[in-house]
Image (cartoon, rainbow, N blue to C red):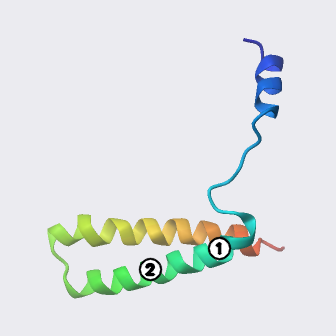
Amino acid sequence: MSLNQVWEAASASPYTPFVAKDSQFAFGFTLLLLALLLTGIFGLNRSFLSIASIGIPASLAFGFGTVYMICAVGVYV
């Protein structure tokens, strides 16, 4: 399959994001609040089990929430 055929096949199914552009701010803000809540809970009980059950989801929520907030607000120089 050539690159031109791949390009033509991709035009039939356009990309649709998981979160719509209009709701990226609310989604990112919710993830950041969830990360703050989970981080507070993790700070109260720092055991090895809570790393997997609370710490990792908190860090993922913070990372994805930050990216969604940057995409929603934009970066202006």
Q: Residue drawn at (49%, 83%), measured in percent from left and top? A: 33
- Which tag, 2 or 1, sits closer to the chain's start? 2
Residue holding disc 1: 69
Circle 1 SS class? helix
Q: Position of residue 51 (x, y in %)?
A: 24, 68
Q: Residue drawn at (44%, 65%), measured in percent from left and top? A: 60
Q: Residue drawn at (67%, 76%), measured in percent from left and top? A: 25
Residue holding disc 2: 34
Foreground residue among 76 and 16: 16
**Mark 1: amino acid:** Met
Q: Residue furthest top?
A: 1
Q: Position of residue 13 (x, y in %)?
A: 75, 36
Image quarter of residue 76: bottom right
Q: Position of residue 58 (x, y in %)?
A: 38, 72
Image quarter of residue 34: bottom left
Foreground residue among 2 and 63: 2
Circle 2 SS class? helix
Q: Quadrant of the N terminus?
A: top right
Residue 27 — which label?
none
59 left or right of 66 in image: left
Q: Which class describes the residues within 10 Å of circle 1: few (<14), some (14-19), or many (20+)?
A: some
**How many angstroms separate mark 2 from mark 1 (CA)?**
14 Å
**Mark 2: amino acid:** Leu
